[in-house]
Image (spheres, rainbow, N blue to C red):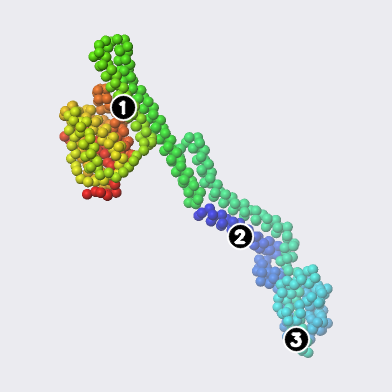
Amino acid sequence: MSIRKSLFLSNAAMVIMPIFIFILYFALLNVLFSGDFKLLNNNYHRGWQTGAGGQNIELFNQLKKTASLEEEKFSSPSFQVTLSKELEDKNAGIIIRKNKRILFSSDNVSKLPKEKLPAFGNEGYQPMVRLGQQPYSIRQHDFYFKDGTEGTILLIDKGVPFIQFARRFFPIIFIGFVLILVLTNSVLSYLMSRRILKPINQMSEAASKISAGNLDFHLEPIRKDELGKLVKSFDEMRKKLKKSAELREQYENNRRELIANISHDLKTPITSIRGYVEGIKDGVANTEEKLERYLDTIHVKAAHMDRLINELFLFSKLDVNSVPFNFEKVELNLFLEDYLEKIRLDLSDEGTEIVMLTNFRIAVFIDRDKIIRVINNIIFNSVKYIEKGKCRIQISFKKQGKMVKVSICDNGPGVPADEIANIFDRFYRGDPSRSSDTGGSGLGLAIAAQIIHSHGGEIWAENSSGGGLCIHFTLPRSNGKGDE
């Protein structure tokens, strides 16, 4: 249930419940002080008469019967005396009127202003008639004397008992009403505030935990209202904060590892450059040929350092997703043919043969420059570890659901089975002893993996059955358009 609906029902209950409870309270008071529960029902239906009202009505009915059969008795002194005695201890009084003349009036109503009594023709029950300062209830019966004169019998009850009861027990009624109002509103307010405050307290405790650095907990919404949705959103925020903290910790660990590896990888060429520079300064390179050889070595080492720094910079940007990608629809077969045409000239001096085994039209959604970087890193990684003049690289691709699987296989020595899962880790080298010769940074395949993952694909490696290493990666198809 929504908070709006809950508030509406709570406010309605704050009005209805006190009224209902007050009616029960008033009925209880009536029973306690009158001793008769039926009295409440009689009061409701008969204008809140007292318990003696039943006897008064019986007398009134007898007088009505007399009026219809023996109306002459109303003028009899003996009848009037008897009637007066019957009414001595009663709250009600009787007035018998002939035309406008009073034939009989009991003592307890004898002083009422006669001109304010109901006129002939108002037969029935009037629950509240004010005669002077006092309210009365009046039962009236109209009849005709034998001479045709209008006659009226009035049963007049002294005051409306409800009002009398209310006046008598006003302090108790007022205090009870106030207590009922306060208690019902307090209980309903407590229940409503508990409904609202419980999830708020839940979030407050969670906020305290988060401020203390504790993100290893779970918030379960207690209800499905707006606050329940807020608790759920708060928990989603906690999950994102936790993920962000874990990523930050991972990035920090990566940064420390990068610094350590950079220090290690840069130390060797810097030491070498420094040694050759000192050799030149000390006159060790005392011939033109030796000086040129020293300078060439310094240039190679400096170029290696520059390449290493560039790859470290690119890997760091890829690691924090700060490299922009320009995705576009590309015909994969045409793209690969154009790429191979450009690098065959560079690889011809190495004696490397490179062929494409698959040639059919299929469109992919890629960043051209980034995928060229991936293929370059894979191919030249193979060339580094294969003897010059014997390297053969094959490229193929095939459809795989909504993706395209690209395979690049070489005829090199492959990778030990227990290390093949590590080749995409940064600074991994299959043959560390040859790193100085090959000039590898250990980041080429790690960069390739980052780029493929940014395309929404996967990359993995396996040793081929005929020898050599195959690296496979997947690229997203361009919604199937352009495929044949």
In the rendered structure, the answer to whether residue 311 lies left or right of residue 203 reads left
Q: Which residue is mark 3?
A: 144
Q: Position of residue 96 (x, y in %)?
A: 78, 80
Q: Amino acid at mark 3?
A: Tyr
Q: Can you identify the residue that label 2 sits on?
A: 16
Q: Quadrant of residue 381?
A: top left
What residue is disc 1 on?
Answer: 307
Residue at image coords 42%, 34%:
248
For marks 3 and 2, give the CA distance. Answer: 51 Å
Please rate how many residues cluster around mark 2, counting C-alpha atoms within 10 Å: few if below 14, some from 14 to 19, many from 20: few
Q: Residues within 10 Å of mark 3 (few under 14, many from 20)?
A: some
**Secondary structure beneath label 2:** helix
In this view of the protein, can residue 80 be seen by the observer? no
Q: Earlier in the sequence, mark 3 or mark 2?
A: 2
Q: Position of residue 413 (x, y in %)?
A: 19, 29
**Looking at the image, which residue is at 68% across and 72% down?**
46
Circles 3 and 2: CB atoms closer than 8 Å: no
Task: Find residue 480 and report its horizontal and vertical position in percent.
Answer: 27, 49
